[in-house]
Image (cartoon, grey):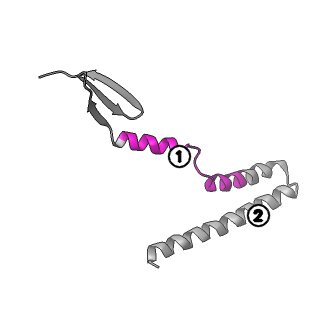
Amino acid sequence: MNSNHKIETHKFWIQVFFSTVVLSLCTFQLVNKTSQESQAMYWGGLTGVLAYWLPSPSNSRESEQYTYASQSSTSQASSDGLVVKETGSQMVNARETEH
């Protein structure tokens, strides 16, 4: 096992440990009916840790297709003299011009 993988593994388990501690503390304090002023702090801690672990809200399939399409834009000449250029998610037709 290389040292970089070992460091990443340790980092992950330390994050899990601290997240568990914060989630437990915040949940315990919210269940114990603490004062209204401190409840906001515990809800903030709870949602902050949960937000850290949740994936970003994006459709990974669409973003993969967009990345692929933008990296490999192509041009094709058709039999009637039109050039079809594909960029991103658009198809653009342009008349071939002779120089």
Q: Amino acid at mark 1?
A: Ser
User: Could you tell me which residue is drawn at 82 percent across and 61 percent down?
Assistant: 28
Residue 46 placement (x, y as % from top left)? 72, 55
Does 74 sit above or below residue 19? above
The answer to which image quadrant residue 89 occupies is: top left
Magenta stretch, main secondary structure, is: helix
Q: Residue 73 in the image: x percent, y percent?
A: 32, 38
91 or 16, which lies in front? Answer: 91
Quick one: 85 or 81, which is closer to the camera?
A: 81
Q: Residue at x 75, y 54 (%)?
A: 42
Residue type, numbered disc 2: Ser
Count residues near mark 1 (Cα–Cα under 10 Å), then give few for <14, some for 14-19, many for 20+. Answer: few
Residue stretch rendered in magenta on the structure: 44-70
Pick out the residue farthest to the front.
Answer: 79
Q: Position of residue 92 (x, y in %)?
A: 34, 25
Q: Earlier in the sequence, mark 2 or mark 1?
A: 2
Taking the spot 70% from the left edge, 55% from the top edge, the residue there is 45
**Side of 71 where 42 appears, left or right:** right
Is 35 displayed left or right of 70 in the figure? right
As for residue 3 lying within the magenta part, the answer is: no
Q: On the image, numbered disc 2 is attached to which residue? A: 24
Separation of residues labelled 2 and 1 (CA atoms): 32 Å
Give the labeled residue for mark 1: 60
**Quarter-of-image position of residue 98:** top left
